[in-house]
Amino acid sequence: MIGLFALPGPLPGTADGTARTVVQDTIEVWVCTVPLDTQAPIYQPSALRLDLDPAVVAGQLDEPVRRWFATLSHGRYAPRFVAGGVLALGVAEGGDECLGRAQDRSRRTADAVLAVANAEHRADAHGGHGYAGAGCAPAAAPCPASVSRRGAYVGASDFHPDWGPLPAFDLVEHELGHTLGWPHSGSPASEYDSALDVMSDSTAPRSAYPGERHAGGTLGVNLADAGWIPESDIVQAPRDGSVSAYRIERSAGPTGLRLLELPLTADRYLSVELLTADDLHRHLPESGIAITLVDASAAACGTPCNRLRRRHVAQGHVPPYTDLLQAGEGPWSGHGWRVEVDSIDDGTAVVTVTHRPVAPVRSAEPVRWARPFDRVR
Ligand SMILES: [Zn+2]
């Protein structure tokens, strides 16, 4: 599905300088022109149409978005944007048709497609959508987007001339997260209310720094899902009632034990990680411990599990969940687990966890998102 290249030497963004496998995706950029008399309800009733050139858009995205993913992955993921083409939508066609027709026409070398409409969406409509695709038949490598249907679609707003020579990147980064199989996160009431995760409120960094164009970082569960935190750097706490203390490094860091899992059932657990208010999370008001309910049960994501429908539910107090758990605060308790922060110092935290079963675990029901804003399937 995605090209694998073992590079011989150190890569930009690798803190430890070791050689590692880099996943390189070729993402073909297509532009869909929206007719002025469009009947598709997603588009703003307006005559504004941007003069978007796929080669120009690919050039705008290429280095900044690749650099953002290099930071996030410590050099393990390198998307490359290349020009596709322009296609004209019919009056009844919207984002799905734009992406689907672009995928149909994309070259065999395209691992994914990014389709951009030249019209803005209505303010109350979703900004775009992204799909991880279905992969290809075994041994079919490479796996082109025309077969896998991997890709993303966005409206024109982030490319409006008011942004200046470079667009806003955060929504594209969010949608590309979906193409990697990452689901939304946030509260049961909204998929878009957490400032901790690009896969929730991707605009959160701009709230703190108005000139910021990029999204913030992501949760450790996504870094692990992508293989950017290896299994050897993830530890699972025992459910035997014992008190266990763990020293964890920040989940966005390059090395070390970075993710603590507190098991609930075979396919549900709590993830415990240290988020530090620097790098891609510099918009956070403080460093601290974040806890996320990860639900990959059949009730949440079906059988087999649709990765984009897994539930990542923030366990903080209230949106935007930036009131992270601190040393010296009372312990966090939930789902039969108790988490206490002993210390946070220079990118390292010591946390003590205890499993104290309660009967029965309350949230066996899948969380239902109330207001989907972009779509996954
Ligand atoms: Zn989304």
Image (cartoon, rainbow, N blue to C red):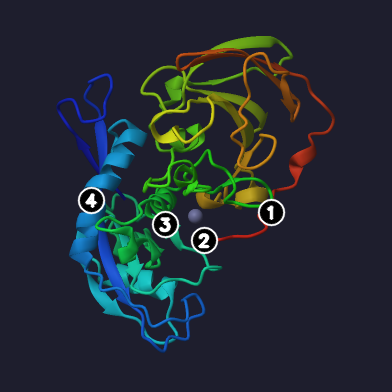
Q: The residue tagged with tag 2: helix, strand or loop?
A: loop
Disc 3 versus disc 4: distance between alpha carbons? 25 Å
Disc 3 versus disc 1: distance between alpha carbons? 24 Å
For residue 353, what is the image quadrant? top right
Which disc is residue 134 wearing?
3
Indicate the position of residue 339 as horizontal and vertical percent values: 68, 20
- Is 341 in front, or is 312? 341
Disc 4 marks a residue whose amino acid type is Asp
Disc 1 versus disc 4: distance between alpha carbons? 36 Å
Q: Contact, CB < 8 Å: mark 3 with mark 1? A: no
Residue 290 vertical placement versus 339 (above, below): below
Question: Mark 3 or mark 1, which is nearer to you?
Answer: 1
In the displayed image of the protein, which residue is found farthest to the bottom?
37
Q: How many numbered tags mark residues here?
A: 4
Q: Earlier in the sequence, mark 1 or mark 4?
A: 4
Disc 3 marks a residue whose amino acid type is Ala
Q: Earlier in the sequence, mark 1 or mark 2?
A: 1
Disc 1 marks a residue whose amino acid type is Arg
Disc 4 versus disc 2: distance between alpha carbons? 23 Å
Disc 1 designates what residue?
A: 368
Q: Earlier in the sequence, mark 3 or mark 1?
A: 3
Disc 2 designates what residue?
A: 374
Please state if 106 lies on the left or on the right of 118 as rendered. left
Q: Contact, CB < 8 Å: mark 3 with mark 2? A: no
Residue for point 67% across, 13% down: 328
